[in-house]
Image (cartoon, rainbow, N blue to C red):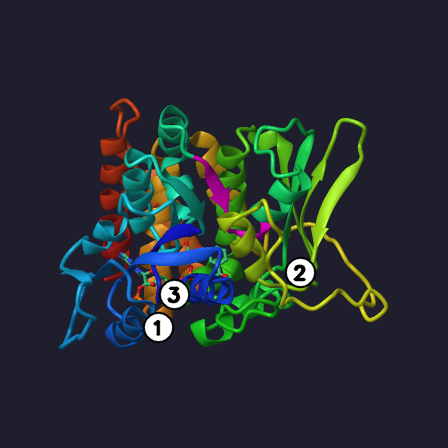
Amino acid sequence: MKKIALIGSTGSIGKQVISVSNRYPDEFKIVSLSAHSNRIEFEQQVNKLNPKVACLDICNGDITVPKGVDFYSGENSYLNAVITEADIVVVSVVGFAGLKAVLKAIDLKKDIALANKESLVVGGEIVMQKAKENGVKITPIDSEHSAIWQALGFDLNKEFKRIILTASGGAFRDLSKDELFFATAKDALKHPNWNMGSKITIDCATLVNKAFEVIEAKWLYNTTFDKIDAIIHRESIIHSMVEFNDNSVMAQLSYPTMEIPIALALNHDKRLCQNVPQLDFKALKSLTFSEIDNDKFPCFKLVVNAGKNGDAYPAVANGANEIAVQAFLDGKIKYCDIFSIIDGALNAYTNDAPYSLDKIFLADEYSRQYAMSKIK
Ligand code: NDP
Ligand code: MG
């Protein structure tokens, strides 16, 4: 039985991890849980799962937890859910906060099932280096990276010629550039194929998510940017592909679901996930592919370039994006301002200090301040 520490239990991924784990009680047990501020949902989860440790960063109101549960609250308390008793740490918090959880899991030499892509975007080089030094395996939950991992026969070090990430195109794929000017957060939250947390759904509508996934693939598969392509595949049936030296391509297909990637990240030795419907090929009229329109979605190239520049630039792009996305969700800025804010933060950033974890945290702080000053 695998003991799971679940960091970010109340989110879209967190809840699906709980349902996969509940479906296979002989395989998995959740031994610790964390959430940020959703007290009601969290309280129900803790009372149902009876973990060893439960952490809620912001606890507005009373909370009742079963006797014997170690309960933590306060700033960064979520890190207390990364515990030595766990066999695997699922990092499914959203945003920069994921980095600290990943680093703590690595320090404790715990394998990681990773949904939080931002940790690899901002600190991929350091994370992968430390994981290697500590013998920690990082398995992907992100569906594209899971598809690649499956196509590689679950071998993160297998040789390949090219990775081809697929992208649905997000909620605004059919809007013209002019129409994008009037696009609202409510519209952006209507993702055509996936039901996810609000931040990643906005990232899909700007294609920042796909740029993050390019950077995530670079670090997970220890490769270079010239070996990673991204294409629009509207149907979200092919979750990504790998091309080998003989130009043979392996793809992974299924209806859009996170349950397969979650079950595999937790235990890839057995294909456990039994409740995803069989693909009905006759009903799939066509599978289509097209290029990303960089004119309509300039954030994609901008953020990939930040990844290529390396150093703390991806952290700058991520921090500015997090603030801009929240402001867009709050109706404070327009869709197009997300690009301007990330671009502005990247252009204004300078720091000649050598690359380090401290530099990443400073870049994150700087870019948030920069973005907030533009929103005011
Ligand atoms: P959600 O917004 O649905 O959930 C986020 C989770 O993180 C919640 O449990 C939330 O707690 C917690 N959280 C939020 N802020 C903080 C913080 N500052 N510190 C600690 N915990 C925090 O996100 P998703 O589940 O959609 O996404 C989670 C991660 O997985 C993201 O990095 C995303 O990019 C990635 N991912 C998601 C996919 C999906 O299908 N949803 C697919 C592929 C990747 P609370 O509810 O209390 O606020
Ligand atoms: Mg994805």
Q: Badges 2 and 3: C-beta atoms under 8 Å apart?
A: no
**How far from the left and from the top, in percent, is residue 357?**
27, 32
Q: Of residues 55 and 163, which is closer to you in this image?
A: 55
* Residue underneath mark 1: 331
Q: Amino acid at mark 3?
A: Gly
Q: Can see residue 346?
A: no
**Foreground label between 3 and 1:** 3
Marks 2 and 3, how far apart in space?
Answer: 22 Å
Q: Of residues 136 and 294, which is closer to you in this image?
A: 136
Judging from the image, what secondary structure is the residue with disc 2 in? loop
- N-term mark: 2 or 1: 2
- N-term mark: 2 or 3: 3
Whether label 3 lies within 8 Å of ligand 1 gets the answer yes
- The question of residue 141 being in magenta is answered with yes
Q: Amino acid at mark 2?
A: Ser
Judging from the image, what secondary structure is the residue with disc 1 in? loop
Marks 2 and 1, how far apart in space?
Answer: 29 Å
Identify the residue at horizontal 39%, vertical 55% (top origin): 92
* Residue underneath mark 2: 236
Identify the residue at horizontal 58%, vertical 47% (top origin): 146
Judging from the image, what secondary structure is the residue with disc 3 in? loop
* Residue underneath mark 3: 11
Q: Badges 3 and 1: C-beta atoms under 8 Å apart?
A: no
